[in-house]
Image (spheres, helix red, strand yellow):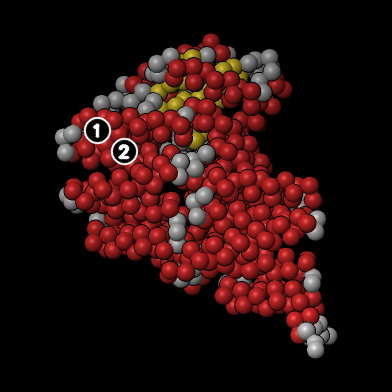
Amino acid sequence: MNDLSSAPPPPLPTDARTQLAQHLARAGSLRSRFPAEALALCEQAEVLARALDSQGDLARALLRAGQCLSALAVAPAGGTRQQHQQAAHERLGQAMELFVGLEDRHGEAEAANSLGNLHATCGAHAQALPLYHRSLAVRRDLGDRIGEAGVLNNIGLLLRDTAQFADALACLFASLELAEDLNDERATAHALASIGTVLAELGETGRATEFHLRALAVLEQWPDPALEASARTGLGRLLARTGHPEEALSHLERALAVAHRSGRIDDLASALHALGQAHQGLAQPQRAEWLLHEALAAARRGGQPLAEAEVLLSLGELRGRQGDSSDARPLLLQALAGAERLQADHLAGRVHRALSRWHEQQREFEPALRHHQAFHDCLQRVQGQAVQRRLRTLLSGSELKVVHRDAEHQRRRGDALAEALDIARASDRHKDELVRALRHQAELLRQLAREDGLTGVANRRWLDSMLMRERERARRHGHPLAVAMIDLDHFKSINDRCSHHVGDEVLRRIGRLLLQTCRQGDLVGRYGGEEFLVVLVETPLAAARGVCEKLRRLVAAMDVEGLHPTLNRVTVSIGVAGDAADPVAEDLVQAADRELYRAKREGRNRVCG
């Protein structure tokens, strides 16, 4: 009598291995846009791999299945999200275990990165970070530079979400450098957009806008719907914040349409939230509230605790402005609990500030003060002096690398315009209109290449370029050179109390004052945020101190009372450095920066150096 349980399995078709390879290849190409279809192929591949006892193919099938399930977990799929996340975790864990056993380090790195992405999506940052670092270490050992760029980008975004902005930027600039060196446009676009989101959190609106625009320019040639939705949402937020509501709505509505098409619920929640904030700024509270509730539902459906807390904050602020004081506080407390649970100090600080204002409106001054202090504690942790110094170093390093590249780009454009002008002049007089248009464009390009759009002083790139030129000139002729770093005291407080519009006007007036007071041969530029840099050409340090003291007095005497009822005067702290022997521009800037922080430590509204 035959024991059927011990009978050998029926033979597989001779083309089973070919079919298995085809399933895996097709699943890999479909998983981003059609994860459900790709998952079905992965499951068929898994059955074939087990039947063939092919452990490597089984690991790859499990990896792809886990990635498809992760994608489905952020699709608007209702109550199946948790099941998808759990199944993804199981598949990816099994895949990584198999890859390790097979000593397949490429597979191990990809599985660790995918597991990290899954944990990060759920807000489990403590679990995600070691997986990312494991993937990063393996990719570096393998010399997989494009894989390294991708993991660095993921680490940067995770650090952004936990308000570790300096570390986040360090990772993201490293990712960008790798991507650009390898001419990988998709990785470049990801890094540019990610850097833009971090700079936006830091209030670096101009720089953030530039990075988002650069990302979108790359995406024109290399489409990526998920990244386009994210970049347009970020750009829309910045445009709304800087007083361009119509342009902001255009980008945000397009981001929403792209998010709907891609089916990513995280992008959908983000676009809805930004649209709600934009309509709130346009004094359309009913439309804003509807959009914010839609964003909250999407964030909860997608299991995004950070996005949920951010939307709760926006809803609480909206209710407070509408006079629904009893409804506002519970929403704000929910937002605070979420931010603290995620250790997101940047968000917790904003919630504490909103709660402080709410309690102040209720004339409950003790809790208002307590939340106000908590807001400043969060702000200090996120943007303290040590963090600011590191951020300045990171931004300086990254921008110096692009100064020469951008200058060369502008030179080529100028040459092209000059050639066009020559052709136009040589043609008949009916082309006068073209000549005028080209002249205007050439002048506009020269202005854009040099000026800061807000203050009219030199922009950072032109400042860095000219500072290097003055360094060489001073070294060649033995002339003294001095540098003054000027920082507006308590500028964040001015923005918080009086609005960003008032803060911008204060910066404009200080820029005009510096231009009117300094000599024509000196260089005045905006170094970043509320900081200005003045390069005092052929000026010994002692004379530079006198110039800086004069500037300090003029700023303190500047009439600003008409800008806002609570704004009586503004002051600046100045650090100055000079070296006639060897005026190296970088050293002078760093020395002036140290003196600036000494001026702030010693009480502000003073000159040190």
- Work out whether residue 20 or residue 371 is closer to the camera in this orientation and state it: 20
Residue drawn at (72%, 45%), measured in percent from left and top? 137
Tag 2: residue type? Arg
* Residue drawn at point x = 58 percent, y = 49 percent: 128
Q: Residues within 10 Å of mark 1 (few under 14, many from 20)?
A: some
Horizontal side of residue 243 vs 190, given as left or right: left
Which of the pair 59/411 is nearer the observer? Answer: 59
Report which quarter residue 7 is drawn in. bottom right
Which is more foreground, mark 2 or mark 1? 1
Mark 2: give few (<14), some (14-19) or many (20+) Cα within 10 Å.
many
Please state the horizontal and vertical placement of residue 362, each as a whole percent of the image.
16, 38
Q: Position of residue 390 (x, y in %)?
A: 57, 31
- Indicate the amino acid at tag 1: Pro
Where disc 1 sits, the SS reads helix
Extreme-bottom residue of the structure: 1
Residue 424 in picture, x, y percent from top left: 60, 62
The residue depicted at 21 percent of the width and 51 percent of the height is: 327
Camera sees residue 329: yes
Q: CA distance from mark 2 to mark 1?
A: 11 Å
Can I make out residue 537 in this image? Answer: no
Q: Residue 367 got which mark?
A: 1
Which numbered disc flags the more N-terminal residue, 2 or 1? 2
Compared with residue 281, is residue 593 higher up or lower down, i.e. above or below?
Answer: above
Instruction: Work out which residue is located at the far front of the displayed protein and give it.
Output: 1
Q: Which element type, helix, strand or loop, lies under badge 2?
A: helix
Q: How many marks?
A: 2
Task: Name the residue that disc number 2 marks.
Answer: 353
38 above or below 502?
below
In the picture, the quarter occupied by the N terminus is bottom right
Residue 73 position within the rendered picture, expressed as x and y whole percent measured from the top left: 51, 65
Q: Residue furthest right?
A: 14
Image quarter of residue 279: bottom left
